[in-house]
Image (tube, coloured by chain):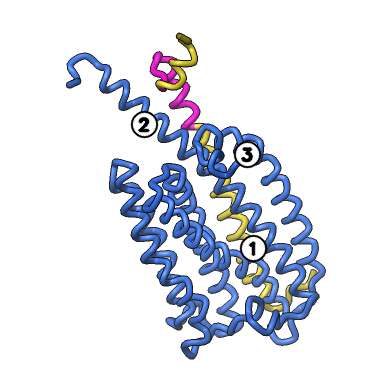
Chain colours: A yellow, B blue
Amino acid sequence: MNLGPHAAFIVAAYAVAALVIAGLVAWIALDHRAQKRRLGAMEAQGVRRRSERSIERPA
Amino acid sequence: MAVVELANPSRFLALAERLLPWLAGAALIGFAAGLLLVHGAPDDYQQGATVKIMFIHVPAAWLGMAGWGLMSVAALGTLVWRHPLADVAAKAAAPIGAAFTFLCLVTGSLWGRPMWGTYWVWDARLTSVLVLFLMYLGVMALWRTVEDPSRAARAAAVLALVGAINLPIIKFSVDWWNTLHQPASVVRLAGPAIHPSILLPLMVMAFAFLLLFAALHVAAMRNEILRRRVRALMLMQAQAAPGSRP
C-alpha cells in the first residue's frame, strides 16, 4: 500500500489509536482482576453482603 | 425481562458476563472488516492517502461526544430517579469518553499538519473538542475527590448536564463560526457528501468503534459494581470491628 508523502502521519495516527485502545482494554482488564481479588480477600475473611448471608442461612 | 429489572446491579453483572464475549467478538470482526475496507479505499482527490486518518478520527470524535451524551442521560437517572446503576454508568463512561476524545484530538492534529500546515489552531471546532476533553478530566477528578459515591454522583451529574451544552456547540461550531475545520460531511440534512467508496469503510469502522465502546463500557460498569461491593464490605468490617461506635 502506497501511503504517499505523508505516510509518517498516517502510520502515527493508527499507532496512537492502537496504543489508546490497547491501554483502555488493559486498564479495564487489570482493574477487573484487582476488584475480584479484593472481593475474594474480603470474603475469605468471612465478610459477606447481607443478601448473601441470608442465602446461606435460610429461615 | 423488563429493562427496569436489568437495572439491578446483580442482574446487570449476570447479563454483562453473557454479553461481553459477544460484544468483544463482534467488535473484533467489525475492526477486521473495517480495516480491510480501509485498505481498499481510494485516496481522496485533494487530500491523497491522508484521508485514511479520517477512518479513526471521525469515529473517535463521534464516540467522544456520545460518551458525554450517555453521561448526561445517566445524570438524569441519578438526579431524578436516584438509581445507583445510573451513577455506575456515568462513572464508567468518563474515562472511555476521555480516551476517545484524546484520540480524536491527536489524530486530528496528525491530519491537520500535512493538510493545513499546522498541528493546532484555536478555531471553534478544535477548541470546543479540547474543552470536552478538559471537562472529562474534570468529571473524573470530581469522582476521585468526593469519597462518598452517591454525593460524588450527584455533583458529577450536575457537571454532566451543564457540560452537555458543549455538544451542540461542537456539532454546529463549523456552521456558526468561520473555522479551518471542514463542515459536516456525513451527518447533515442533505445527506452525506462523501463518495460511497469512502463512506462505506467509514461507517463500518464507526460501527466497530461503537461495539468497542459498548464492550468497554459494560466491562467498566462491571468493575465499578465490584468496587462498590468491596467498599460496602470494608465499611461493614470497620463497623463490626471492636471499639467501633454502634
The residue where tag 2 is placed is B231
Residue B195 placement: quadrant: bottom right
Element at label 3: loop
> Residue at image x 40%, y 21%?
A50
**Real-space CA distance between mark 3 and mark 1, rounded to the nearest whole angstrom:** 41 Å
Q: Residue type at mark 3: give it.
A: Met
Classify mark 2: helix, strand or loop.
Answer: helix
Callouts 3 and 1 in the same chain: no
Task: Tell me: B245 left or right of B105.
Answer: left
Mark 2 surroundings: few (<14), some (14-19) or many (≥20) residues within 10 A: some
**What residue sits right under mark 3 in the picture?**
B1
Residue highlighted by disc 1: A14
Q: Mark 1 is on which residue type? A: Tyr
Residue displayed at 79% across by 72% down: B41
Q: Which callout, 3 or 1, points to the residue nearer the camera?
A: 3
- Whole-percent x and y of residue B74? 46, 53
Q: Which chain is home to disc 1?
A: A
Q: Is residue B133 above or below residue B15?
A: below
Residue shown at the point (37%, 55%) measured from the top left:
B157
Q: From the viewer's perspective, tell me whether residue B67 is left or right of residue B185.
A: left
Image marks 2 and 3: residues in contact by CB distance under 8 Å:
no
Residue B60 falls within the magenta-colored stretch:
no
Q: Specify the segment rendered in magenta.
A: A34-49
